[in-house]
Amino acid sequence: MANQNNNGKMSREEAGRKGGEATSKNHDKEFYEEIGEKGGENSHSGGNNSGDGKMSKEEAGRKGGKNSNGGNS
């Protein structure tokens, strides 16, 4: 059941599936635990570490709260 485009190339979905299968054959449970832990450390930092110059949601909320007049004009 190969998902291929008209030009004979593999779709992104098929390539991802094959890559995931190959990775799972080459690595054990400890590998996935380790990369999951690293990902969790990066995503739960509370800030924006992506380097794209955008502020985090938390920072935006603080700044918005400071600038708000509470709905009073």
Image: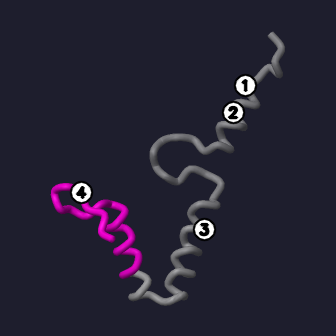
Q: Residue furthest front?
A: 1
Secondary structure, mark 3, is: helix
Q: CA distance from mark 4 to mark 2?
A: 48 Å
* Amino acid beneath label 2: Lys
Look at mark 3 in the image and give the residue it sits on. Answer: 40
Q: Which mark is residue 67?
A: 1
Which circle's residue, 3 or 4, is located before the other in the chain? 4
Q: Residues within 10 Å of mark 1 (few under 14, many from 20)?
A: few
Which residue is at 59% across, 60% downward?
Answer: 43
* Amino acid beneath label 4: Asn
Q: CA distance from mark 1 to mark 3?
A: 32 Å
* Amino acid beneath label 1: Asn
Which circle's residue, 1 or 3, is located before the other in the chain? 3
In the picture shown, does residue 67 fall above or below 57?
Answer: above
Evaluate if marks 1 and 4 touch, with contact meaning CB atoms under 8 Å apart.
no
In the picture shown, does residue 44 fall above or below 64?
Answer: below
Foreground mark, 1 or 3, reads: 3
What range is drawn magenta here? Answer: 1-22
Look at mark 2 in the image and give the residue it sits on. Answer: 63
Evaluate if marks 1 and 2 touch, with contact meaning CB atoms under 8 Å apart.
yes
Secondary structure, mark 4, is: loop
Q: CA distance from mark 1 to mark 2?
A: 6 Å
Residue 9 painted magenta: yes
Look at mark 4 in the image and give the residue it sits on. Answer: 5
Secondary structure, mark 1, is: helix
Foreground mark, 1 or 4, reads: 4
Which residue is at 72% across, 37% downward?
Answer: 62
Which circle's residue, 4 or 2, is located before the other in the chain? 4
